[in-house]
Image (cartoon, helix red, strand yellow):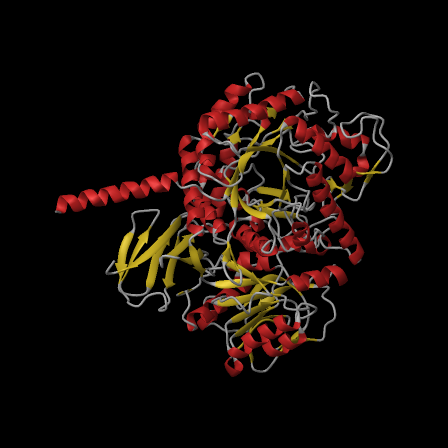
Amino acid sequence: MKCAIMISFVLTILLFETNKTLAKDPTDRWIELDLYWFDQDNKKESAVKFWERYHTLLSDVSGWKGVIINIGWSMDFLLEWDGDVKKDLKLPKGLKTYPFFKDLAQLSGSSEERYRLNKERFKNADEPAIVDYGRWTYRDIRELVLQIRKVGKEKYGMADLRIGTYVLGFKEIYGGETMSFYGKHPNMFRDNVCYDGYSFPDFESFLSADKNSYASFPKGIPEGTPFNTFFALQWGSLSKVLGLDVIVFRDSFLGVGVYDRNGPYGKKAPAEPEKVARWSEATADLVKQTKLANPKALVIGYSSAASAVSDWRVNCFDLEAIAKEGYLDAWIDQTWAGAWNEVAQRPPPYFWNAPTLGWSYQLANILVHAAVLAETKVRHYILVGIYDSWESWDVINTAPESLRWSIWAYSHAAVKMPDSLKMPQGAYISWCNKGKELLSEKNVQFLRKNINEAFADAQQVKEVFGPTLVYNRSAMQWQSENKPDQNIREWIDEQAGTLSKWHIPILSITRSEYTAKVKSDMFIYQTPVHLPENEKQTILNQIKSGQPIMIIGSPVGGLDPEIAAMVGVSTQARAVDDIEYVGSINGRTSGLYKDLPNTFPLFQPYSRNEASPECEIVYSVRNSPCLIFNRSAGKQALFWDAPELSVNIPFKQATGKQILFGDETFRFDAMPGGSDFGRSTDQILGSPTSFVLAARHINDLMKKNGKLNVAYIDQYNPLHISAWQLRNGEFRILTAAIEEGINHGPDQTRTLELNIPEEWVDREVIIWENLWGINRYSTNSRKLFARLEQSESRLYRFVMNNQ
């Protein structure tokens, strides 16, 4: 009998594993690599070698899938196309890679120690390589596309492959030649007013008369031809002839200001609403004309990597309106978080990288874009940034557990819709070559396993726990149509991306029009102003009823008067012109103020605020309450006039020109996204204290309401937490020690004491299991204790003692 039971059990397991293998992932997947990896003289052999290594990444997918090839970065291959496949592509010469380092490990120790180690790392790195693309004809590209498609279909059964390319909105890159088409039509670019030497395509521009022959204009370009029209017609012709069926608008296209909050008019939108409207219309026109030029080809957008809110509010284009027009097929959030978060990945003087584009901020950007796209048919993708074909950073080999965390966290970024949860619909994997090398088979299987399992798990999620962000389109629209240059502290993605560093489990978002129909442990509202009456009443009712709530916005223009009165904040200020730099908790040292300095630096856009007598002032700046808590009449309402990040302060307000670290002195004022305050996370925040105070009060509300919470938040112990429940009732806890630039000491381990809600479990004895390790232990309390090493990530599930 026992033998029969055992045989039955084994057969069941084998059947389960077989079904897992045969099951297709319904999401989309794309892989990206550079043309320079392929052998021009042996295209078929290159295609065979490529697919031998990468076929498993795409063969599991039943949604859209394909390969995106970088054809020399420059737009010249498209804009200079004259219809003759025998002609050479105009590929730039002189492009140079970063020095690739050889020690594929994460550096440990204090910040000072790792800074020195980084210098040693790059002393021993390879010399920068000059990339020579050689002479590729358009016929060569067509043949390569054919071979990639043919081998994928015939050898691996992928009959529905799509092969595409992308365009970059830069005149030159990596020290290479300036694009030749720009020499003939310099007015197709507009200078970026933030950074000298940077420019971007001008979608409102008109081309000059040009007698050269082009595929779309064989007799030359007539004077006054719109750039958008010429671009689209060139793409339509080129894509049909070469067999390309995808175009990605990469950096500096849909969002011409990249990597920080800047746009076509600088660090903020212009004062004239009509300028914002014209730029948005021009961007939409480019997407529409490109799609109509070849309706069978997909048109995919690509984020700026910086604040998703800034798309409309600074980059001056309305992504939601463009998406609803129906010509944009998909959207990639360029979540190269590891490339920007991990330190010691780029040659000196770079060390701190770009923290505001790091792991937690990209999760918040995904959430906001998910809300923006929630009511559209545009497919939303995360980018799995593994290493780079051109730059030195290498996350998959130096910080693989951080990368694993990002795959799982980003794939579970949920929009709470009135009747369901909406998750990202696919992954874009980049890069898939570094020089002439491909990913190792081990790394390919690491990606395959985690992407497959993460997206499969996300499709089974029943509930996401923790605070839910609330995106307010009405406010963003009103500002863009009336006062586009006014900052009302609407940057909920940057605010949430910072809060989540300190144990606040933010993994969901909704829209203000949904909040009456969705549930959350706590809503965090973005600038509740200019709302329809029913949405405003929902918020007022939530506050009155004692539901835990946080409202973020400036009392100057970012807060509805009735809501302001209800939470207990007011101001007589009519504008915010100055930045103040010192906050204070007014001498308190116990409870939620324990182990925090009485005064602390920050970057506070200043208005003189007043708090109602019944409110607790958590901290103030120059006698102006910035974070207040109203618990009167059963309320549980936090209001936060949130500080800025230093990188967003207009440069004219920063003073000084040099930052000193160790024995190196170097300038930051010329670096993209730089400021004069420093590059580590704590320098960009001013200090962690204002954000830790906000996080502690959110956590305290969660605790008092029986929700998921931690025992204590130490400002030098940043740790990420996310939590969700599957439809089968199983709970998941995702945690990771991935923050840099906050604790500068040699000990980079992080500790967690997580309190599990009683509503989750009906008994106290719980068995915890780390699904990514061998840790399994039982506890007689509703707590999860963990100690994580630098860059470690864990995925826990818990079962009852009788399971």
Side (left or right) of 286 relative to 50: right
User: Can you give x and y, in whole percent of width and height, for residue 118 in the image?
Assistant: 50, 38
Of the pair 70 and 349, the residue shown nearer to us: 70
Q: Nearer the viewer, residue 688 or 56?
A: 56
**Residue 605 found in image quarter:** bottom right
Q: Position of residue 717 (x, y in %)?
A: 44, 57
Quadrant in the picture for residue 783: bottom left
> Is 619 located above or below residue 308 in the figure?
below
**268 horizontally vs 794: left or right:** right
* Viewer can see residue 516: yes
| Extreme residue in the top direction | 41
Could you tell me which quadrant the C terminus lies in? bottom left
Q: Is residue 625 visible?
A: no
Q: Residue furthest left?
A: 1
Q: Viewer-proximal residue, 582 or 415?
A: 415
- Residue at image position (63%, 66%) is 527
Marks counted in the figure total 0
Q: Nearer the viewer, residue 5 or 497?
A: 5
Q: Position of residue 286 (x, y in %)?
A: 73, 43
Location of residue 639 (image quadrant)? bottom right
Q: Is residue 611 above or below residue 504?
A: below
In percent of the image, x 62 and y 59: which residue is there? 491
Q: Is residue 437 above or below residue 775?
A: above
Q: Could you tell me residue 208's position as x and y percent?
A: 85, 34
Q: Is residue 413 above or below residue 596?
A: above
